[in-house]
Image (cartoon, rainbow, N blue to C red):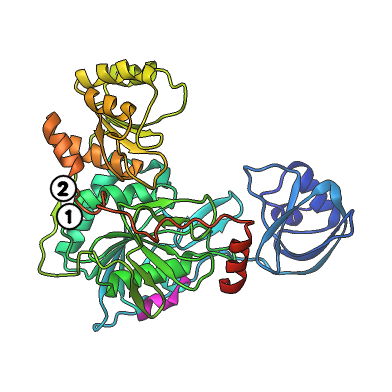
Amino acid sequence: MSTEMQDTLKGYKGRARARLSALGLRVWSEARLTNDAGSVFEGVILPRSETLDDEHIVVKMKNGYNVGVHVDRVAAAVELGFKEAIYKIPEKEFPVQPDLPRVTLLGTGGTIASRLDYRTGAVIPAFTPGELYGAVPELADICNLTTKKLFGVFSENMAREQYITLAHAIGAEIAGGVDGIVIGHGTDTMGHTAAILSFMVQDSPVPIVIVGSQRSSDRPSSDAALNLIHAVRAAAYGDIAEVQISMFGPTSDRYGLLHRGTRTRKMHSSYRNTFRTIGDVPLAVVSRDSFTHINSEYIQRDRSRQVKIDAVYDERSTILYYYPGMHPDLVDALVEKGYRGIVIAGTGLGHVNKPLYPAIKRAVDAGVHVMMTVQTLWGYAQMYVYDTGRDLLDIGIVPLDNMLPETALMKLSWVLGHTNDREEVTRLMRKPINHEITEREPHNGYLIMQGGLLETEEYIQSHWK
């Protein structure tokens, strides 16, 4: 094999490398591959991630999607053209217009605008104002954007250090006079971060909008650019001065929704409209050119208001998701390991089995704060209805009404950063700060349409566009 051919097969190894060479194809070739079933795949031969197998040739189809063709199934191939790609987001100087609002984008490692390094399979984020302008030029018509990268972690690695750093960075930006703040964040734990910031950053004078993307920017179905446009608009012009999440509303790109930070949950692993407001209604609908408020209860933008940064966090708290037959040694083990707080996601109205009672009593007697939420997500922990609930109340469990389990964990970690006094912990946990507990749930909030039913299918056919 010539050196030139070797250079054009970088990223491929073993059988896939040998097969490409035998076919006379190169990375970045425009090619037509036919498999043993007669199916035709026409597109660009992409570099192969060095960390993946040597069994497939990767083709970026004309529709924008990638497909892997197994080397044993390639019956014929022809190179139609060749143009080596430099896969780089264009960078242009972000224009400054004095009459536009000032927005700061704080980066935590989310890939709201990104490119894919096909050699390694890694996502490389666009982050500088110039890169973002090159990727999403509409931003320049919305605001004067400044970006600051705080850290670069996957969202599952967000924890105490990152939460505290982020809260203080928000405070510094507000003190610097920005009109709004956007936080780029991975979607997996976005709800957790939104919740903890709702407690760490109180009385903000400006909007704080967390945004991410479910699908990377190299995919034709990516939600990254539109999510970013919606989030920046909400930060620059929106009237909701709270911690909120901005993501797709429907699966289409018709509009986005602004969700309150304490009442939001990721509900699907891959859908673009994965985020839902639970136990309430979303704050607002946001589009490229308008806002429509849904929830009338929110803190309004007021530049004269003084923000309170209260960035404390005790990591010695956890969630215990109850299941039938759970053994008491799980509770005992948490106490032995020094945990100070336990949030139980109980069944029904907030229940666990009787064998757990002595272990929970031992935990309470040892000074551990035990809270009860419901794993149904919708509805309230109403522990006075059945004997089970009354017994648990007598033991010392604190019901948290309709607070989401993840929000309860974030709040308990924050409260325990202030005090270990039982009465004060209970008072703070049950006192709403930002709608983490609501007096009632909306009559039209709990709407889950069961697929396959006649009425559901009729509704979809008449409303889905």
- Of badges 1 and 2, the one in the foreground is 1
Q: Which label was assigned to residue 418?
A: none
Residue 267 percent coordinates (x, y): 47, 51
Residue 402 percent coordinates (x, y): 31, 45
Q: Residue at x 33, y 52 (%)?
A: 263
Q: Is residue 6 above or below residue 313?
A: below
* Residue 78 colored in magenta in the image: no
Q: Is residue 338 above or below residue 36?
A: above
Q: Is residue 137 above or below residue 28?
A: below
Evaluate whether residue 382 shows in this view.
Answer: yes
Q: Does label 1 or label 2 sit earlier along the sequence?
A: 1
Residue hosting label 2: 310
Toward which corner of the image does residue 326 lie, by quadrant?
top left
Evaluate whether residue 465 shows in this view.
Answer: no
Tell me whether circle 1 and circle 2 mark residues in contact (CB < 8 Å): yes
Q: Residue at x 39, y 45 (%)?
A: 377
**Residue closest to the eye, 44 or 163:** 163
Q: Is residue 70 above or below residue 134?
A: above
Q: Is residue 385 left or right of residue 463?
A: left
Identify which amino acid the numbered label 2 is placed on.
Asp
Residue 299 percent coordinates (x, y): 20, 64
- Prevailing SS of the magenta stretch: helix
- Which quadrant: the C terminus? bottom right
Residue 273 percent coordinates (x, y): 49, 60
**Residue closest to the eye, 6 or 235:** 235
SS at mark 1 in the image: strand
Q: Is residue 158 left or right of residue 302?
A: right
Q: Which residues are magenta?
A: 135-141
SS at mark 2 in the image: loop
Identify which amino acid the numbered label 1 is placed on.
Gln
Residue hosting label 1: 202
